[in-house]
Amino acid sequence: MSFLKKQKTRKALSTLESRMGAELPTELVTLMEASDALQVGPCRFSDPEVVGSLSARLPSWPPELIPFAAASAEWFCLMRVDGQPPSSWPVMLAIANPPAVVPVASNFRGFLFFIGLHYTDSAYLGKDGELAKRLMADLGVSQTILETPVPPTKMPEENLKYDKAALVPQCILALRQTRAQDGPALAARSLLTLAKGTPWWGAPHHLLARLYTQMGNVVNTCGCYWNAIERANVYSGFSSRPQLADVGIARTAEMQAVAFLREHEAHVPEQLKTLPRWHWLVKAVDVQDIGARVDLARRYVSIEQWERALWAFMDALAVAERDADAAGLVLQEMSMIYDTLGRPYEASVCRSSVVA
């Protein structure tokens, strides 16, 4: 890359960094400065101006997402985490339709190993294969990793060798415990640990509900389904790319949870029935209706449950994607919550996502 192009790249990325009040991960900047639209397998790093302007973002995605590379119709994104250094921001696979976000690495360095493990040999690495290998080797990903195919059954273990906090492989290995004696109970303990460590992610709760259903424990199943639908549906764990990040959760997971809770109302703990989510569950004719979801979010706002309000508004966004007016109103209300929480970057992303 020429000196002028490097300057242009640095300027585009600096604009975003100034807006965020934080620097992007060093490894990402290094890759973008070293090559125009570097391609590693089906993963093509974006033009710096696309990254800096957030122009690849969809309004229905959480405002924390920063798309930096395309993977066919999906995008790899950094997930900005308020209060954490950029070197610790996780990398997500963001899906457009229906909106879904799946964690593929616990940080950008872990993501480099993720693509190195998934996209092996020069032929599959694509036109930039040799350059990609050289650049990634400079960043600590050896050519051996890039050139050694990993059987799909061994991929979770290999991922965790290089990224111990990666969520999807931890889920997969937890589920494999069901094959052992007392397997469901062992798997449940592992998933409970994951759920406590990732309060925004619904996947462990959906998987726990499935396990408790198999064990015949209706009360625990109700509790886990409740926890699952309290999170934004975009974080349910659904993926359309099973070869990259799939834990076996269907796009209909939310409706399965709603149906189970309605059917087993007598087993839902009484304290849960005093919360806004229960009113939505039993009163809404169609829980996927935009109005019902917005009403739920506003109920959470009224009791200052800000995170749950944001998750409910995200659910409203997911079904308002084709209704620009409704989506605009939801984004405006989300921006006000982020302002209340002292998170001006996310507030500004919501406001800039409103279609005039």
Image: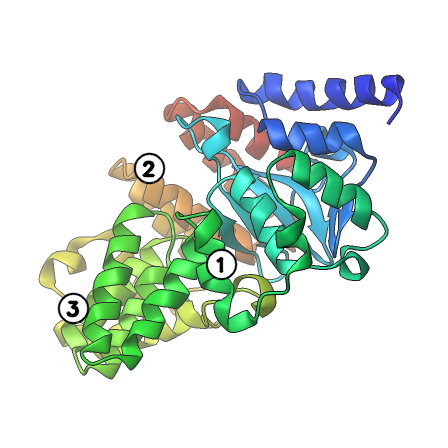
N-terminal of the pair, mark 1 or mark 2, is 1
Q: Quadrant of residue 293?
A: bottom left
**Residue 345: x %, y % from top left:** 52, 25
| Residue 289 falls left or right of residue 176 | right
Q: Quadrant of residue 264?
A: bottom left
- Answer whether labels 1 and 2 touch (C-beta < 8 Å): no
Which amino acid is tagged 2?
Trp
Which amino acid is tagged 3?
Val
Answer yes or no: is residue 62 visible: no
Name the residue located 43 percent from the left edge and 29 percent from the top edge. 338
In the image, residue 154 above or below residue 68: below
- Answer whether labels 2 and 3 touch (C-beta < 8 Å): no
Which residue has dot 1 on it? 158
In the image, residue 68 above or below residue 217: above
**Residue 299: x %, y % from top left:** 30, 45
Which residue has dot 2 on it? 306
Which residue has dot 3 on it? 268
Secondary structure, mark 2, is helix
Q: Residue furthest front?
A: 144
Crowdedness near tag 3: few (<14), some (14–19) or many (≥20) residues, C-alpha within 10 Å: some
Question: Foreground mark, 1 or 3?
Answer: 1
Q: Can you say which quadrant of the picture contains the N terminus?
A: top right
Q: How is the image coloured?
A: rainbow
Crowdedness near tag 2: few (<14), some (14–19) or many (≥20) residues, C-alpha within 10 Å: some
Answer yes or no: is residue 14 visible: yes
N-terminal of the pair, mark 2 or mark 3, is 3
